[in-house]
Image (cartoon, coloured by chain):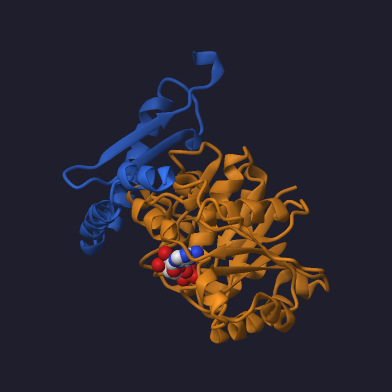
Chain colours: A orange, B blue
């Protein structure tokens, strides 16, 4: 059974695209068939973060409008055989993302892939709504910062009310991923605490990704961080997160790059 | 310490790579027609290659894959034709 996952947040710049690439590559590395889809029509970036920007000819909208077949538009990753990307259109209008069109493509992708990972644009407009509409599960990306938490709360509400699952009276399974977590700021008490965020949003935590320069390096290179620096702190955090996504029970830690120190262990009793 | 040094010496700076990638990408994106003409070209090629191949063997449209790699000096076309078993 293939799973449709949306990476969403409301707020922009919190790490959705970074996470889509990192998680997509980490899952594909284990041999599972993965496609990552960019829903950010007009401002595509997933292609750049994945390093496939030079190979985009056809996009998601071309397929919806019948101008290209799905196999023409899917770009196979050059590093991992089981990973593909479907780019967003850079020139078309968001209105081209029709519910029927998106459904048809997702249904077709379900026949070819184990994981369909939808990178949502910021906001709560059409692109964001369509990215989450057919999701089985959602990874809500939150930074430890007030406006991000507020926007996540809003998105959780929308996941529970407007998605296909919600309309059928079912629930989209929700996971919280805290990204850009700065351990030094946390130590000074100037960052929203993980427990506080969990209390406010009350959805289960799937991981904490530390702030790291490896993320910047990875996007410069066009290689998901889980491939460019698989042993780095953010990669270990992403790798644990995909294990939890697959149902493994692992204690939540905040990996650090300072080798010789123990990973920060978050003692939680949830 | 060994971790620090291996980090320091083995990794090339990533910013120059980022700059190169952006220059190539933006050169293509700024010529407003380039995306449209890429996809038009691919569609034409696909049709014509199909026509030639159909004279000799029957294959379906999906089995011809034309991929593009846009470079700074030139771009490359990769044409992948999957031939059914009986013709091998
Ligand atoms: N864990 C992290 N550490 C450092 N920088 C990060 C991290 N996660 C994301 N970033 C940076 O934050 C910026 C926004 O990330 P991006 O994934 O594009 O966000 P979104 O898709 O939510 O808009 C990018 O510059 C990215 O490199
Ligand atoms: Mg993004």
Coordinates of residue A195 in the picture (x, y in percent):
70, 77
Total numbered labels placed on residues in the image? 0
Coordinates of residue A186 in the picture (x, y in percent):
56, 76
Whether B20 is drawn above or below A131: the answer is above
The one of A148 and A182 positioned closer to us in this rendering:
A182
Does residue B35 appear to the left or right of A194 in the view shown? left
The one of B79 and A122 positioned closer to us in this rendering:
A122
Residue at the image point whose x is 83% and y is 74% from the top: A169
Does residue B31 appear to the left or right of A44 in the view shown? left
Whether A95 is drawn above or below A228: the answer is below
Whether A176 is drawn above or below A3: the answer is below
Residue at the image point whose x is 74% and y is 54% from the top: A250
Q: Is residue A44 visible?
A: no
Coordinates of residue B86 in the picture (x, y in percent):
55, 14
**Quadrant of residue A62 in the image?**
bottom left
Residue at the image point whose x is 52% and y is 51% from the top: A259
Residue at the image point whose x is 46% and y is 49% from the top: A73
Q: Is residue A88 visible?
A: yes
The one of A54 and A194 positioned closer to us in this rendering:
A194
Coordinates of residue A48 in the picture (x, y in percent):
38, 56
Q: Quadrant of the C terminus of chain A?
A: bottom right
């Amino acid at each position: 059974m293939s799973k449709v996952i949306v990476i969403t947040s409301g707020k922009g710049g919190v790490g959705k695209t970074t996470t889509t690439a990192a998680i997509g590559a980490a899952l594909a590395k284990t041999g599972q068939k993965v496609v990552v889809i960019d829903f950010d029509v007009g401002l595509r970036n997933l292609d750049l973060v994945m390093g496939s920007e030079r190979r985009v000819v056809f996009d998601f909208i071309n397929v919806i409008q019948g101008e290209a077949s799905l196999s023409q538009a899917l770009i196979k990753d050059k590093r991992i055989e089981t990973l593909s990307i479907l780019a967003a259109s850079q020139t078309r209008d968001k209105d081209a993302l029709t519910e029927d069109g998106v459904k048809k493509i997702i249904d077709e992708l379900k026949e070819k892939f184990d994981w369909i990972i939808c990178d949502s644009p910021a906001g709560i407009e059409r692109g964001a709504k369509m990215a989450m509409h057919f999701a089985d599960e959602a990874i809500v990306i939150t930074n430890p910062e007030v406006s991000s938490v507020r926007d996540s709360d809003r998105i959780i509400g929308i996941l529970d009310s407007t998605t296909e699952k919600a309309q059928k009276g079912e629930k989209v399974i929700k996971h919280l991923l805290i990204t850009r977590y700065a351990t030094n700021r946390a130590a000074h008490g100037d960052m929203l605490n993980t427990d506080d965020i969990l209390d406010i949003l009350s959805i289960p935590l799937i991981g904490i990704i530390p702030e790291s320069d490896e993320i910047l390096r990875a996007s410069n290179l066009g290689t998901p961080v889980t491939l460019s620096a698989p042993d780095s702190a953010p990669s270990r955090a992403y790798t644990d997160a995909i294990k939890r996504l697959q149902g493994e029970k692992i204690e939540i830690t905040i990996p650090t790059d300072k080798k010789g120190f123990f990973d920060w262990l978050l003692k939680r009793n949830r | 310490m060994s971790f620090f040094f291996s980090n320091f010496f083995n990794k090339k700076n990533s910013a120059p790579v980022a700059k190169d990638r952006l220059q190539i990408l933006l050169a293509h994106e700024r010529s407003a027609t380039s995306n449209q003409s890429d996809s038009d070209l691919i569609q034409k090629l696909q049709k014509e290659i199909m026509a030639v191949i159909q004279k000799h063997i029957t294959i379906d449209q999906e089995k011809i894959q034309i991929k593009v790699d846009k470079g700074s000096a030139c771009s490359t076309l990769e044409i992948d034709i999957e031939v059914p078993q009986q013709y091998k």
